[in-house]
Image (cartoon, grey):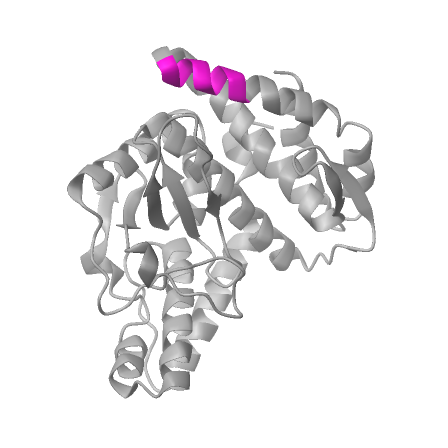
Amino acid sequence: METSAVFDFPPTTRLHDERTLKIHTILSPDAQPQPSGLGSAADYCLAHHALEGADSAARSGEQATFDWYTANPHADAATSSTLTTLGPRVVVAPDLTDLPRSPISETPYYVLGPGTGRAPIPLLTLAASAFATAADTGFGTLLAAHAVVVVLLRTKQLGQTLDSWTITRLPGTVFLDHVGDPAILARDLIHEAGHNWLNDALTATGCKIDDQVTFHSPWKQSMRPAFGFLHACWAFPLTMLYTACVLEHTEGDVQRFLTAYLEQQSDHLATTVADHPRALELVGDEGLRERLAAVHRQALTL
């Protein structure tokens, strides 16, 4: 299965459309839902931002902010977005002290709102270049639907640990550190978008993963529930496939960094050969199971 074809998964498209309509109806019961013009996957992502923002405003009694969200179910992304090769993306770089923590997430997060502004131009350029690099290596379909809102966190030096994450309550949103290089940022965009893709695919197919079953994770060096193990055996192979494609277009320290990364991930993935088929047996949908198996199998050949 071609890498780009792996990400085209009809159940997820239906999920996006159905959930977006439901959220818009909750936010504005008397209004006729209108698309943003950014695409159905973007509308799905932005609707979750509007829902979270409205819920938070309602809980804290901020009427004006609540009214803004109900009047802007797309979180006003049309005016705060930046054009990229994959279409409009919302790229922000908030002050980290402004990122709240709450019961909805173990990690800090950011919700688009009336005060949202674009990231500085150099970061917009970096993100646009990263999207173009990912698209050139076959990952455009993945990022187009699952990396709509990009929250850039800390600027770090090459070789430092780069933190990145997603949260299930904000699908289509990714949170990432960066080193100022588009090839490396594209790798991390693919990794986090992969998590968003799999979360949506599991939801869309109604697959419930039995987390009483555990497997050894070479990435965590511990026994992990099947859900986390399957996520790792999907997201890391995606970055391996990307890295193998992009290496010839890099040089110097970046090329050495990515080469070492690919070698490390190949070693990790090799230790999952026996367990991965057993974990896939917990995935009830055949189409999803085939996609997870194909990516894992292809990465093993690198």
List x then y, in percent, for residue 147.
41, 47
State the quadrant of the N terminus: top right
Q: Nearer the viewer, residue 59 or 43?
A: 59
Direction from residue 21 to residue 124 in the image, left or right: left
Indicate whether residue 165 is drawn in magenta.
no
Q: Nearer the viewer, residue 178 or 285?
A: 178
Q: Is residue 164 above or below residue 263?
A: below
Q: Is residue 89 above or below residue 23?
A: above
**Residue at 26% across, 60% down:** 77
List x then y, in percent, for residue 211.
77, 55
Q: Is residue 161 above or below residue 195?
A: above
Q: Chief secondary structure of the magenta span?
A: helix
Q: How many marks?
A: 0
List x then y, in percent, for residue 40.
39, 57
The stretch of residues the image draws in magenta is: 253-261
Q: Nearer the viewer, residue 276 or 216?
A: 216
Indicate whether residue 258 is drawn in magenta.
yes
Residue 74, by quadrant, is bottom left
State the quadrant of the C terminus: top right
Q: Is residue 101 above or below residue 158?
A: below
Direction from residue 7 to residue 80 in the image, left or right: left
**Residue at 22% across, 66% down:** 115
